[in-house]
Amino acid sequence: MSGQTPKDFLKFLKNPDFIDGIYNYCDSWCERCAFTDKCMNFAMRKYKEEDKSETNTGDNLTEVLQQTTDLIKQIIEDKGMSWEEVASEADKETHTVDPHKEADKHWNVRAAKEYTYLYGSFLKEEQGFMRGKGVEFQNELNKGIISVEEAEEALLQIEDAFEVINWYQSLIYIKIRNACQLFFEEDLSDFMVDYYNGKAKLTLVSIDRSLAAWLVLQVHFPEKVNKITRILFQLEKLRRQIEKDFPNARKFVRPGLDK
């Protein structure tokens, strides 16, 4: 960002190719995303990475922070307000309830946390079982029971399932915790109600994909059926409760992602 002014940076952010708000409801899995060229967050990250080649890390961080502050001030001034006025209004805001803390007590959040525990326990208790599956495939290859192609395809399915499960297990907790703040916020605007529904939609999509991935593991590891079934049951309970608590979540159209 060297040599860039706040207005230059603001112009960069107004790229007409960007899909407005797409990053608010995505799973942050950029490596698998088909819309990175239309995402402002992704572009900003690349923009900063390119700038690191021109400045050292400390200078870059300082400049980013200053650039952000200058940009906010510029936007405020463009709206005919002053930095002091905005700061004063912010100081006046009071909340009788902390939505973040209250959300932690919600059943959905506790259920999501329980899922992360079940996931962690499964990995801890089943250390090395992937290696065992590799040995099993090798023995079946040697006996001519399966072909090399079949073994490779099965291993790819298992690897992909693990990647999906691992990626979404923490995301489910984080996003439903965010969504459940809806029930504890005061004087919500229609925009914020939609915002929380979008977070619930992302949680549901994450659960859908996780369920599918666990079913793949259940097929390939029938001896683990009891443990995997318990995990599937936990996810299904959570999915149904979220659909009940957020009846409009499935209908929510995430910008770019659901069109």
Image (cartoon, helix red, strand yellow):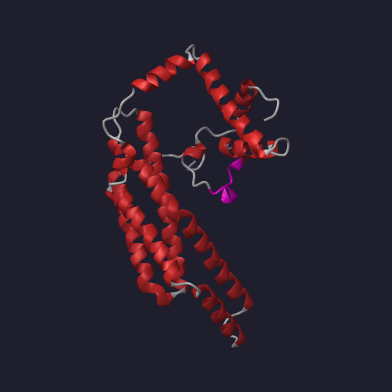
Q: Is residue 103 visible?
A: yes
116 lies above or below 67:
below
Frontmost residue, 91 versus 167: 91
Residue 182, position in %: x, y?
32, 37
Residue 34 is one of the magenta-drawn residues: yes
Query: Is 50 on the left or on the right of 170, as rendered?
Result: right
Q: Position of residue 73 (x, y in %)?
A: 53, 19
Magenta stretch: includes residue 201: no
The outermost residue toward the right is 54
10 relative position to 120: left or right: right
Residue at figure coordinates x 62%, y 24% from the top left: 11
Whole-percent x and y of residue 103? Answer: 31, 43
Which residue extends farthest bottom?
143
Q: Quadrant of residue 119?
A: bottom left
Classify residue 165 as left or right of residue 5.
left
Residue, x 60% and y 72% (percent of image)? 152
Residue drawn at (41%, 55%), measured in percent from left and top? Answer: 208
Q: Position of residue 230 (x, y in %)?
A: 33, 66
In this rendered view, identify the residue nearer to me: 253 or 190: 190
Q: Which residues are magenta?
A: 29-36
Q: Is residue 250 visible?
A: no
